[in-house]
Image (spheres, grey):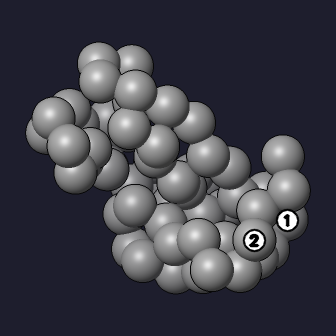
Amino acid sequence: MMMIASERCTSCNATLAEEGSTGFLCPVCGQRINRCYRCREQSIAYTCSKCGFQGP
C-alpha cells in the first residue's frame, strides 16, 4: 500500500513516506490505524483514537 507523506504513524506521529509503512482498519471500530516501519518492526503499542483498542 502506498502511503502519502501527510499521513502520520498512530504510535509515534512520524510521517509515513518510507517503504514498509502500512495502514489498516481498527478491528473493533473501523478507524484507520497507521504504522511506520520502525514501530512495526519494534512492535510498539498503538491505541485507536476512536475506541481505545490497543494493539502491538
Say which residue appears at 49% left-offset and 66% top-offset. 9
Tell me the number on the disc at residue 35.
none
Q: Residue furthest left?
A: 52
Image: 14 above or below 41: below
Give the side of residue 55 with respect to residue 37, left or right.
Answer: left
Say which residue appears at 37% left-offset and 63% top-offset. 11
Mark 1 and mark 2: Cα distance apart in space: 11 Å
Q: Kindly tell me whether residue 54 is visible in this rendering.
A: yes
Q: Nearer the viewer, mark 1 or mark 2?
A: 2
The answer to which quarter of the image holds residue 37 is: bottom right
The answer to which quarter of the image holds residue 19 is: bottom right
Say which residue appears at 49% left-offset and 31% top-offset. 25
x and y, in percent, of residue 36 in the image: 60, 64
Give the side of residue 25 with respect to residue 56, left or right.
Answer: right
Say which residue appears at 84% left-offset and 46% top-offset. 1
Image: 33 above or below 25: below
Three-letter amino acid code at disc 1? Answer: Glu
Q: Which residue is mark 1?
A: 19
**Disc 1, SS:** loop
Tell me the number on the disc at residue 4.
2
Image: 19 above or below 30: below
Question: How many numbered marks does the figure carry?
Answer: 2
x and y, in percent, of residue 16 in the image: 66, 72
Mark 2 crowdedness (10 Å alpha carbons): few <14, some 14-19, many ≥20: few
